[in-house]
Image (tube, grey):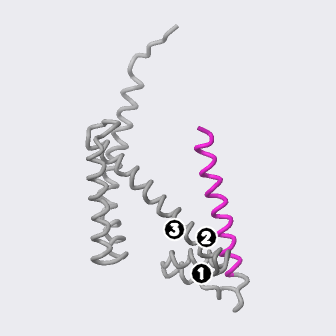
Amino acid sequence: MLGVLLVPTLIIFVWLVIFGGNALYQELHAAGGPGSAGIIELVNAWNLPAALFASADGIAGTGTLGWTLSALMVFLLMSWFVTSSDSGTLVLTTILSLGNDHPPRRFRVFWGVVIGLVAAVLLVAGGLKALQTALIAAALPLSVVILVMTAGVLVSLLQESRRPRVVRE
């Protein structure tokens, strides 16, 4: 249990120290003076992938090590996306199957494909801006659902606290 909490936290810490420290170093010590490395401009323009790869180039250069680091970053981002999507479809299908902890695999595959297709259609139709707009538009109704779910959990906790407790000796 402790490893599940500490290992990802330490990995994220190391990632942020290396990449954040490198980005700051590049911005402060660039050849054209502070702010001329371009990472801040890329982040301000919401071009985060370019900023990430510019930071990687600053760490490893543009040679073989740079390409290896870039490939590693792409692999890590893909594994994060797949893991997050799998977790999301598990939660969705568990809710839709009325709390079944092991929903049928075909439901998980179906909802995974549907979610992927919706994202792909939004990206093809309007690019990243359309996808971001759809996410913002979905946030308010989802917030209401989350508030209702929170109220349901609180009611369940109150009901649980009022039940008589059985003490085993």
The amino acid type found where label 2 is placed reads: Leu
Q: Is residue 58 above or below residue 162?
A: below
Where residue 113 appears, as percent x and y from the top left, is 29, 58
Q: Is residue 112 above or below residue 162?
A: below
Q: Which mark is residue 72?
A: none
Find the distance from the CA under tag 1 to the CA under tag 3. 19 Å
The amino acid type found where label 3 is placed reads: Val
Where residue 58 appears, as percent x and y from the top left, is 66, 78
| Mark 1 or 2, closer to the camera | 2
Residue located beneath label 1 in the image: 39
Find the distance from the CA under tag 3 to the CA under tag 2. 9 Å
Residue located beneath label 3 in the image: 74
| Mark 1 or 3, closer to the camera | 3
Disc 3, SS? helix
Q: Is residue 130 left or right of residue 81?
A: left
Q: Is residue 25 magenta?
A: yes
Query: Residue visible at 26% across and 40% down?
Result: 97
* Front residue of 134 and 107: 107
Q: Earlier in the sequence, mark 1 or mark 3?
A: 1
The amino acid type found where label 1 is placed reads: Ile
Query: Residue visible at 32% across and 60% down?
Result: 140
- Asked if marks 3 and 2 touch (Cβ < 8 Å), the reply is no
Number of residues whose C-alpha sits closer than 10 Å to that of mark 3, classed few (under 14), some (14–19) or many (20 or more)? some
Work out which residue is located at the far bottom of the displayed protein and give it: 32
* Highlighted range, magenta: 1-27
Q: Which mark is residue 69?
A: 2
Where residue 52 appears, as percent x and y from the top left, is 56, 74
* Front residue of 5 and 141: 5
Q: Is residue 25 left or right of residue 146?
A: right
Disc 2, SS? helix
Query: Residue visible at 58% across and 43% down?
Result: 4
The quadrant of the picture occupied by the N terminus is: top right
